[in-house]
Image (spheres, helix red, strand yellow):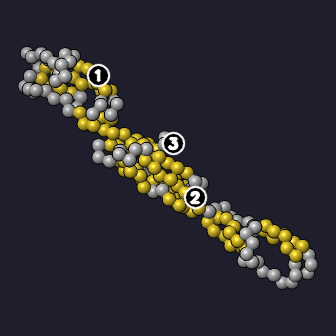
Amino acid sequence: IGDTITISAIPIEGCQFTRGSDGPAEPSRTIVVTGDMTFTAYFESQMFTITALTENPDLGQVVGGGLYNMGDTAELIATPNSGCQFMQWSDGVTDNPRYVIVTQDESFTAIFIERVNIDVLSDDETMGTTSGSGSYVVGETITISANPNEGYEFVRWSDGSTESTRTITVAE
């Protein structure tokens, strides 16, 4: 009785001290012993915020952000809108869904790209065929070709170009 001692509440990894049973919120303190004494330390899991965003909501949506306990696994799912595709997360990771082990507050932004269908057609398939049709990313450079059948020759594309094989940038 009368001794001065230090008591400490030391949380394990992933937890934090919240308060002592007698009220003080300091995890370490000095007390004077006055007799038999009992102290209870209260702990809780550390919580972290995982933020899941989309770079452009017109291209896709993201779910999975929220408040998580330390060590939990957050599942982030990027869902592209029609005509779009998921490209990657802002840190370059391409996994979708993406699983993140929570150790700190973090933010992840999904990057989507717009895709368009390009149809390269012949006005009369008995005279020739075309190539280059497909689904492409806006801004992508592609090659399209008109291939006349024997006895025919290519005249022009619908936009007036007379090059039978040409490179275009996908715009719409």
List the residue tagged with mark 2: 48
Secondary structure under badge 1?
strand
Q: Can residue 54 be seen in this snapshot?
A: yes
Q: Amino acid at mark 1?
A: Thr
Eyeballing the image, is 145 above or below 89? above
Q: Can residue 75 be seen in this snapshot?
A: no
List the residue tagged with mark 3: 91
Secondary structure under badge 2?
strand
**Would you call the spot at circle 3 few (<14 residues within 10 Å), some (14-19), or many (20 or more)?**
few
Q: Amino acid at mark 3?
A: Asp
**Would you call the spot at circle 1 few (<14 residues within 10 Å), some (14-19), or many (20 or more)?**
few
User: Are the residues tagged 3 and 2 within 8 Å (C-beta)?
Assistant: no
Where residue 62 appears, as percent x and y from the top left, is 41, 52
| 65 or 121: nearer the viewer | 65
Split into 4 quadrants, where in the image is the N terminus?
bottom right
Eyeballing the image, is 119 above or below 88? above
List the residue tagged with mark 1: 167
C-alpha separation, residue under disc 3 versus residue under disc 2: 19 Å
Query: How many discs mark residues in the rendered view?
Result: 3
Q: Quadrant of residue 68?
A: bottom right
In this rendering, would 110 be left or right of 168? right
> Who's the residue at 46% across and 49% down the image?
53
Q: Amino acid at mark 2?
A: Phe
Label 1 vs 3, first from the N-terminus: 3
> Who's the residue at 47% across and 46% down the image?
109
Label 3 vs 2, first from the N-terminus: 2
In this rendering, would 63 be left or right of 131? right
Where residue 127 appears, as percent x and y from the top left, is 8, 22
Nearer to us of marks 2 and 1 is 2
C-alpha separation, residue under disc 2 versus residue under disc 1: 49 Å
Where residue 139 appears, as percent x and y from the top left, is 34, 30
